[in-house]
């Protein structure tokens, strides 16, 4: 098993509003990345409903609203999500 401190965690809201914006599909797409050190965590409602699924780099404070998996992948690859080492 890998050391969890080495992971760069990304939180994906699994609340009902975000599920309506395909948060589960977004989480699956992000989990499918072959990028070493990324870990996707599904979390309870983040209370930032509306406008897309809420995605956050752990402890960065930056909340992003994603409307589809392709958008999430583009943002991550562009480095806008800036994941940081932390536990989910």
Image (spheres, rainbow, N blue to C red):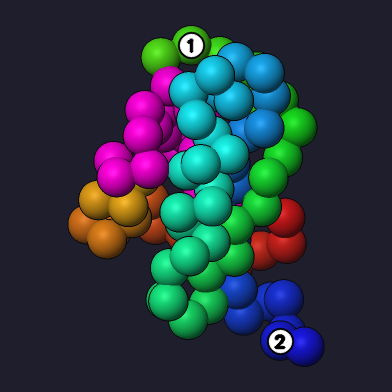
Foreground: 86 or 14?
14
Residue drawn at x 66%, y 52% as measured from the top left: 41
Callout 1 secondary element: loop
66 inside magenta stretch:
yes
Give yes or no for contact between labels 2 and 1 (Cβ–Cβ under 8 Å). no
Farthest top residue?
50
The image quadrant of residue 62 is top left
Q: Is residue 26 left or right of residue 19?
A: left
Farthest bottom residue?
1
Q: Is residue 36 left or right of residue 19?
A: left
Foreground: 81 or 44?
44
Residue drawn at x 59%, y 25% as measured from the top left: 19
Residue 54 image position (x, y, % from top left)? 51, 30
As drawn, 38 above or below 40: below
Residue drawn at x 22%, y 57% as measured from the top left: 78
The residue singled out by tag 2 in the image is 2
Foreground: 7 or 41?
41
Residue drawn at x 71%, y 86% as measured from the top left: 2
As drawn, 19 above or below 72: above
- State the extent of the magenta-drawn residues as a range: 52-71
Tag on residue 50?
Answer: 1
Q: Is residue 8 visible?
A: no
Q: Residues within 10 Å of mark 2 (few under 14, many from 20)?
A: few
Marks 2 and 1 sit apart, C-alpha to C-alpha, by: 35 Å
Quadrant containing the N terminus is: bottom right
Q: Residues within 10 Å of mark 1 (few under 14, many from 20)?
A: few
Of pointers 2 and 1, the one earlier in the residue sequence: 2
Q: How many marks?
A: 2
Residue 56 image position (x, y, % from top left)? 52, 42
Residue 66 image position (x, y, % from top left)? 39, 32
Q: Is residue 66 left or right of residue 5?
A: left
Foreground: 20 or 87?
20
């Amino acid at each position: 098993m890998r050391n969890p401190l080495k992971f760069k965690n990304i939180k994906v809201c699994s609340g009902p509003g975000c599920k309506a914006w395909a948060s589960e599909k977004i989480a699956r797409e992000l989990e499918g990345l072959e990028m070493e050190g990324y870990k996707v965590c599904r979390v309870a409602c983040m209370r930032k409903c509306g406008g897309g699924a809420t995605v956050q780099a752990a402890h960065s404070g930056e909340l992003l609203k994603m409307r589809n998996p392709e958008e999430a992948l583009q943002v991550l690859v562009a480095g806008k999500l800036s994941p940081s080492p932390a536990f989910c």
